[in-house]
Amino acid sequence: MSAPRMVAKSMLQKADELGCPLTNLKLHKLLYLAHGLSLAKYGTPLIDGEFAAWKYGPVVESLYHDLKIFGSNPIKPDSQFIAAWPLLEENSTHNHVILSILKQFGAMSAGTLVDITHRADSPWQAVFDESTRSRIIPDEEIQSYFKKHLKAA
């Protein structure tokens, strides 16, 4: 399990290398998918933090607030704000999970990723309540869902 900033910077860097620009919204959807894959395939969470069910899908609140300065613009891993954030170890399991998710879902639009994370039987759908801005999605629910639905690469 790793700090949200470390995982985010590692995903941003890998996405940049693949020519796949990520906005805050798209980054969060891909982080959620990677978190689910890590739980399903390895039984360990990717991120040391909880995903909350927001209107546009699962979000790590602290990371969202860190990155909201970028608005809907792509986030570059070498931007002044992010440059000092640490990276995951290159050959770590978490980096392999991130790369797998980027290869499977990175070319999809943010809207398509929102649709994927909002499916009727999803953990987000199970806890989302429009009147409550932020309800936590339990890792146990995420793990169970991804074991059933995501092809672990």
Image (spheres, rainbow, N blue to C red):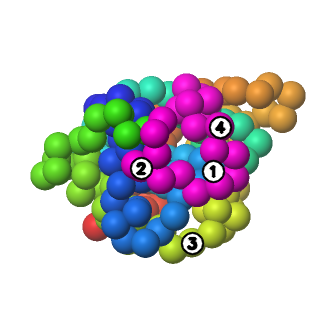
Location of residue 71 with respect to 69 vertically, above or below? below
Q: Which residue is mark 4?
A: 68
Specify the amino acid type for callout 2: Pro
Residue at horizontal 40%, vertical 62%?
A: 15
Q: Nearer the viewer, mark 1 or mark 4?
A: 4
Q: Which residue is mark 2?
A: 77
Sooner in the amino-acid sequence: mark 3 or mark 2: 2
Depth check: 66 or 56 in front?
Answer: 66
Estimate how packed mark 3 is, as few (under 14), some (14 to 19) or many (20 or more) residues with alpha carbons within 10 Å. Answer: few
Location of residue 43 with respect to 1 vertically, above or below? below
Specify the amino acid type for callout 3: Met
Cα distance between the residues tagged 3 and 2: 20 Å
Q: Nearer the viewer, mark 2 or mark 1?
A: 2
Sooner in the amino-acid sequence: mark 2 or mark 1: 1
Cα distance between the residues tagged 3 and 4: 21 Å
**Mark 3 and mark 1 residues within 8 Å of each other at the beta carbon:** no
**Mark 3 and mark 4 residues within 8 Å of each other at the beta carbon:** no
Specify the amino acid type for callout 4: Lys
Cα distance between the residues tagged 1 and 4: 9 Å
Taking the magenta stretch, the answer to whether it contains residue 65 is yes
Sooner in the amino-acid sequence: mark 3 or mark 4: 4
Q: Which residue is mark 3?
A: 108
Classify residue 99 by image quadrant. bottom left
Q: Which residue is mark 1?
A: 25
Name the element at disc 1. Answer: helix
- Numbered mark located on residue 63 in the image: none
Residue at horizontal 37%, vertical 71%?
A: 18
Sooner in the amino-acid sequence: mark 1 or mark 4: 1
Which quadrant of the rendered structure holds the C terminus? bottom left
Magenta-drawn segment: 61-81
